[in-house]
Amino acid sequence: MLDIGAWVQEKREGLGLTQKAFAELLGMPETGERTIRGWELSEHLPTPAKRAQIENLPDTALLRSPYTFDPESADFSFIDLFAGIGGIRYPFQKQGGHCVFTSEWDKFSKKTYAANYGEVPQGDITKIAAKDIPPHDVLLAGFPCQAFSQAGLKQGFNDTRGTMFFEIQRILAYHRPKAFLLENVKQLKGHDKGRTLETILSILEGTTVPEIPETVPMSEEARKSLGAKLNYRVGYHVLKAANFGVPQNRERIYIIGFDRDQIAAADEADICTDIFNRLAMITCTTCVGDILDSNASVDPKYTISDRLLAGHVRRLAEHKKKGNGFGFSVFTKDSPYTNTISARYYKDGSEILIDQSDIGKNPRKLTPRECARLQGFPKEFNVDAVSDCQAYRQFGNSVSVPVIEAIAAEMKPYITG
C-alpha cells in the first residue's frame, strides 16, 4: 500500500523544494506549509484534487530548468516583483544578474516560473516585510497595470492594483538599490491628466513627499515609509515592441532610476535621458509570419468555429454602425505586426486572429508557443506547465522581452561600473 506521507515528501524533495515553496507551487494559502508537514507526517491526507495535482508535477528537480543561474558568475543582483512568468527577469539574468528574490501571487504563473527558473516565487508582496527581502542592486517590477489601462477601469490609486506602486516605494526606501526598472501600460502617462505619473516620479526623485489620502489602500509598512526621501535620477519613455524586433503593436511606459548617492553622473549628465534617447533611435522591420507556424501544422482546435466567427462579424458591424473602431482583427503572415495581445486573449482571440484562407479554414487563434514568440521569449521557454487558457493570460500580462533586453544592456554599465 502506498505510503502517502512518504510519497509527498519524496515528490517535494525530488523537486528540490522546501515545504513552504511546495505549498506555494500548489497554490495553497499561508497555512499551506503546515498542511504539507501534516501530509508528510501522515497526520492527514491530501484531498483527491490535491493528490492529482501532485501527481501531475514533474519528477525531475526544478534546478534542471532551462534558465537557472550560477550566483558565482553574477555581475550584480536584482529582485523580481510582480514577476508573472519572468519576462523581465530573463533579460537581466542574461546580462549577468543574479535574482535573489521573486514575488508573484498567481498560482498558475508560479508554475510556469518554476518550470523555467527552478524556483517558486514567494506570494503577496503586501504581506512580505522589506527586511525579509535580501539586499540587491536593482529592483525590477512590472507592477499591475489594470488600474491604469485602456482595457481596465482606469481607477489608478483608487484601485488596490494601482496602489502596488507604494509597495515598490517602501522596498526602495528600505534597501536603496542602485537602480530600478518599472513597466506599465502607456495610459499611465496620461492617467488623471498626468497627475498619477507626476506623483510617482516625485516620490522616486524625492523632490516632494505628496500627501496620499488615508482612503488609498496600502500595507501598513508602505504607509509608514511614505515620508522617506528617495533620491533617484528618474526618466521615462513609451517604447513600441515592434521597434525591437517582435511583430506586435505593443506600447508600454518604462521608468528607470539611478540612486544619486551610489551612481555619479559626469557633470550631472542626465543618464536616463541619454539611455532613452538611444533606445528611441532603435527601429526594426517586422513581419507576423516570423512568429507563425504553418497553418497546416497547427492543431485544428485553435481554429475558431462558424458560430464564433459569425458573432465577431455581427459585433464588428454593430460597432461600425456606432462609429467606433472595436471589433476582431485578422492578420496574415505578411502583416507587419499584430494588435497588442492582452490577458483576455483566451476568451475569443478577437484582437489577434490568423488568416487561414490558404487551407480553406476559418481564422485561428495563436498557439501558446506563437504567443511566446510574439512577446520575444526564447525558443527554449517552457509554455506547457499550464493549460492553454492560463498560458494566454500569462503571455497577455507579460512584457516584450527584447525591449527589456535593450533596456538591461543600457543600464548594466551604470550598475556595475
Image (cartoon, rainbow, N blue to C red):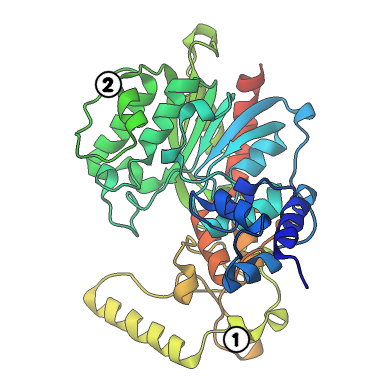
User: Which residue is found at the position 24% from the left and 35% from the top?
Assistant: 195
Please indicate whether residue 165 sits to the left or right of residue 286 in the image.
left
Circle 1 sits in a helix, a strand or a loop, which is it?
A: helix
Q: Position of residue 116 (x, y in %)?
A: 70, 52
* Residue underneath mark 1: 357
Tell me the residue at 54%/10% (across/down): 264
User: Amino acid under label 2?
Assistant: Val
Residue 309 visible in image:
yes
Residue 273 falls left or right of residue 147: right
In terms of depth relative to the viewer, which is nearer, 111 or 288? 111
- Disc 2 marks which residue? 209
Badge nearest the viewer, 2 or 1: 2
Residue 60 at x, y percent in the picture: 80, 57
Q: Give the crowd class for mark 2: few <14, some 14-19, many >=20 residues within 10 Å.
A: some
**Residue 194 image point, x, y percent:** 27, 38
Looking at the rendered structure, the kind of residue marked 1 is: Ser
Q: Toward the viewer: 333 or 384? A: 384
Give the residue drawn at x 38%, y 37%.
Answer: 165
Q: Is residue 361 above or below residue 50?
A: below
As drawn, the label of residue 348 is: none
Query: Which quadrant, please, contains the C terminus?
Result: top right
